[in-house]
Image: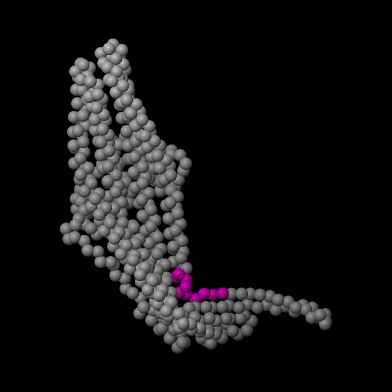
């Protein structure tokens, strides 16, 4: 029993080779804070703040059927199984065999002689210097990182779904505006044709009206294509060939959340990509420890036990007598092991630098999204005023043209300015909604 106690005592040496993890130093300006209240952080179903029941249903369908999310779940399960396997390496492995044989002498007729046997084998690598424990830790951290990968995939899919849904609404809005404008221009062209036939306008007026109508119809084909692509994007997210989900008709009914203020920088750490990167730092650090432990010898205990005698009783009475130890020291591979340790350290240092860069990129994304919220909100007021003025100007130009005071080009240009102003208002609504999604992503949902 003294030998066993010695083995367990030596196993404690592994803790001497374990490196204590320290989070990377990430200086942040003392006055840095985002502009959203801490007590108003979004729930896991953050997209519900847009109060669109059809959008909520669509997101649920994507989460239930998307292939990328399913693949991320499978990778998580694989990482967890690898972690469980690494756990098993810390415990003895047992093997068993059973057999039966028969023989018969050719010289006499004594019949068959049968023999049966059974054996039990035990093998255990004593983790004297913590290599197996470090490998287990590396697998465990990797499994936790894979769980964050799954969450990051989920967050990305939700954002893509919400954006594609709004792009479909945006395309439908633009198509609707385009159809009304085409109808309006067709009526204007009919008026010009009558005036040209009466000799009250020139051929130039007629051709300019025809050109305006043709250009609008050409633009309409691009808008229809944009709608097709938005539908196809949603179909891919749903993991199917054709889109059969809700068809939002307008962005005007979408609710843009109100501005708020007061979010500390620490909440950046909610992002699953940052959490996953830091967990992989821990995994790489454990891998460095495991590689460093390869400098030291491996000690394996093995034993075999056969049935049919007093071996079992003897084994239970004195297990050490039935165990043989094998000590394998890597004396001839020191240079190779040292290089592997240096490689592991370099991988850890590179991952630390990448993590630090990702952190500051995350802060930049939050800053940009918060600034965009403010600027787009201010822009909305100016665009609404511009649209109102463009509509009134168009009406004035129409009256002047009908009165024969101006050529049709001025009226057509006024129509185009009104269309541009209306589309700018819609674009602002889309940008404000898109910025909200960007902010939720930047904060980890």
In the current view of this chain or complex, which residue is farthest to the right?
A: 108
The image shows residue 207, relative to residue 363, as above or below, that is: above
Give the extent of the magenta segment: 86-95
Q: Position of residue 98 (x, y in %)?
A: 63, 74
Residue shown at 29% from the left, 23% from the top: 208
- Give the number of callouts: 0
Q: How is the image coloured?
A: one colour
Q: Is residue 317 visible?
A: no
Q: Position of residue 279 (x, y in %)?
A: 35, 64
Side of 195 where 58 appears, left or right:
right
Residue shown at 24% from the left, 27% from the top: 413
Q: Position of residue 360 (x, y in %)?
A: 26, 58
Q: Quadrant of residue 5?
A: bottom left
Foreground residue, 284 or 315?
284
Q: Quadrant of residue 204?
A: top left
Q: Quadrant of residue 294?
A: bottom left
């Amino acid at each position: 029993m003294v030998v066993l106690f010695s083995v367990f005592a030596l196993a404690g040496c592994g803790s001497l080779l374990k490196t204590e993890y320290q989070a990377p130093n990430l200086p942040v300006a003392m006055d840095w804070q985002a502009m959203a209240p801490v007590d108003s952080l979004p729930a896991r179903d953050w997209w519900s703040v847009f109060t669109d029941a059809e959008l909520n249903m669509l997101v649920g369908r994507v989460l239930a059927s998307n292939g990328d999310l399913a693949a991320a779940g499978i990778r998580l399960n694989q990482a967890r199984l690898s972690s469980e396997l690494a756990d098993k390496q810390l415990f003895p492995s047992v093997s068993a065999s059973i057999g039966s044989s028969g023989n018969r002498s050719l010289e006499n007729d004594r019949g068959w002689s049968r023999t049966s046997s059974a054996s039990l084998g035990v093998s255990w690598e004593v983790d004297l210097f913590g290599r197996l424990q470090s490998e287990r830790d590396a697998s465990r951290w990797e499994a936790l990182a894979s769980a964050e990968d799954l969450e990051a995939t989920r967050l990305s899919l939700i954002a893509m779904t919400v954006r594609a849904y709004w792009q479909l609404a945006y395309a439908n809005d633009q198509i609707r505006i385009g159809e009304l404008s085409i109808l309006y221009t067709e009526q204007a062209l009919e008026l010009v044709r009558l005036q040209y036939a009466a000799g009250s306008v020139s051929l130039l007026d007629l051709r300019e009206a025809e050109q305006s109508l043709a250009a609008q119809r050409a633009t309409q084909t691009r808008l229809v294509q944009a709608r097709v692509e938005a539908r196809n994007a949603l179909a891919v997210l749903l993991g199917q060939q054709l889109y059969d989900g809700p068809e939002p008709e307008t962005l005007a009914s979408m609710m843009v959340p109100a501005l708020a203020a007061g979010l500390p920088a620490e909440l950046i750490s909610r992002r699953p990509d940052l959490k996953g990167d830091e967990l992989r730092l821990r995994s790489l650090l454990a891998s460095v420890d495991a590689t460093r432990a390869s400098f030291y010898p491996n000690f394996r205990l093995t034993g075999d036990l056969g049935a049919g005698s007093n071996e079992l009783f003897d084994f239970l009475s004195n297990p050490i007598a039935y165990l043989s130890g094998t000590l394998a020291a890597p004396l001839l591979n020191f240079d190779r092991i040292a290089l592997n340790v240096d490689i592991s350290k370099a991988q850890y240092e590179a991952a630390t630098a990448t993590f630090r860069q990702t952190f500051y990129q995350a802060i930049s994304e939050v800053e940009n999204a918060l600034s965009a919220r403010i600027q787009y909100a201010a822009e909305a007021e100016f665009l609404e005023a511009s649209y109102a003025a463009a509509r009134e100007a168009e009406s004035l130009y129409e009256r002047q043209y009908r009165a024969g005071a101006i050529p049709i080009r001025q009226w057509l240009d006024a129509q185009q300015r009104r269309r541009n102003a209306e589309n700018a208002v819609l674009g602002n609504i889309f940008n404000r909604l898109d910025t909200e999604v960007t902010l939720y992503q930047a904060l980890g949902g």
